[in-house]
Image (tube, rainbow, N blue to C red):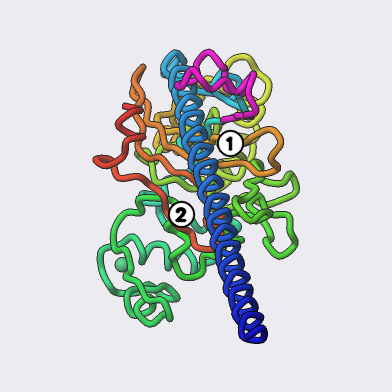
Amino acid sequence: MIRQGECRKAMVLIVVVYIVAAYSMLAFALAFRSRIAIKETQLLTERLQQDQIALAACAQARSILEADDHDLDCLDEPWFGWHELVPAETADQSISPDEGPWQVSWRLIDESAKINVNTAPADLLLELECLDEAAVASILDWIDQDDVPNPDGAENDYYSGLENAYSCKNGPIDNIEELLLVKGISLEIFYGYNLDEGDSHLSETGPETSEFIDEVPQNGAPGLCDLLTVYGDGRININTASKQVLDTIPMLSDAAVSEIISMQKGAPRKFSSMDDIQNNDNFNAVDILLLAQIAKFNSNHFQLHIKVRKKERPFWCEYMATIERQEENTRILSWQRKSRTIVKDITRFIVDDDESSYLQGLK
Ligand SMILES: [Ca+2]
Ligand SMILES: [Ca+2]
């Protein structure tokens, strides 16, 4: 009888131990899931705050562009260069980047200073140092409507045979990153630096986001993203164009390029019309003829680059928007939030015009 009682006690003890262990595991699992839920909520809240701050930076950039002299655009105007977000203009007044943990910078990149890839003739693209004849042939094939490849070019036959096949565009390029789909256009050609040597201005440095180092290295060659655009009528604003862009204009003299660059950097007076070119002895007759066809003196499209981060964090959250300006009015053509997959997957984040709460809020 005593032995039976002891056995029963032992059984009860074992059952109690199992129950306690089971409850402990359940409690641990619940605590773990709670921590994940809290973390997810924190990340979502932070994401929403980043979006609000980026919208505020966009509003500030637009107001500067709208107040700017839209008949002449040059590099010493208020829109050019990096800006810090002014707290008073923060869209959500509960978020003050100045007092809070946020650091916010933005800059406008003049798309009218670049060559329109959709309208550029082959001889102009061939002047780009980073493109060889095969790459230019492939770009032209990507854009032209036919399916007949240029010599060394590529049409549907090539793209449909790739491991991850896709179709040749056979139409105008809508987003400059589309060039990364074209045969022969590598990340290095597109971004203009050597990814393998670690001097890229896009380098993945963290588990949650990426560092988008903002400037092309001083000793690095510009990439297609710095030289080509999909916006505008093909004319180039010579008050903001880089030397690399000006050098692509076939038959434009070295003296003309030097005069344009020196005027951009120092002189208080800029080129405001063809009269300024014709009355300048540094331009010969051919220069004047060329510039009459390709030059303009103001800009209508800008790329807005916004960087947002919490001050204690090493990683920036990146936004890119395209702003079109017509006289004193601006509108947003595209809005992208960059993720860390932007380098490797070349994922586009253009938000659909009709579905985007961002774009609706910006108009
Ligand atoms: Ca201006
Ligand atoms: Ca084609």
The residue where tag 1 is placed is: 307
The vertical placement of 103 against 39, above or below, is above
Q: Is residue 288 visible?
A: no
Q: Nearer the viewer, mark 2 or mark 1?
A: 1
Looking at the rendered image, the quarter that the C terminus falls into is top left
Of the image marks 2 and 1, the number of the one nearer the N terminus? 2
Residue sitting nearer the eye, 193 or 45: 45
C-alpha gap between disc 2 and disc 1: 19 Å
Please give the name of the residue rendered at 51% of the width and 28% of the height, measured from the top-left corner: 53
Q: Which residues are magenta?
A: 84-106
The residue where tag 2 is placed is: 177
Number of residues whose C-alpha sits closer than 10 Å to that of mark 1, classed few (under 14), some (14–19) or many (20 or more): many
Residue 148 quadrant: bottom left
Residue 151 in the image: state x and y as whole percent.
41, 75
Please give the name of the residue rendered at 65% of the width and 78% of the height, measured from the top-left corner: 10
Please give the name of the residue rendered at 38% of the width and 72% of the height, measured from the top-left corner: 150
Does the closest atom of ligand 1 sit within 8 Å of the Cβ of label 1? no
Amino acid type, label 2: Glu
SS type, badge 2: helix
Looking at the rendered image, the quarter that the N terminus falls into is bottom right
The vertical placement of 155 against 67, above or below, is below
Dominant secondary structure of the residues highlighted in magenta in the image: loop
Magenta span includes 91: yes
Residue 252 quadrant: top right
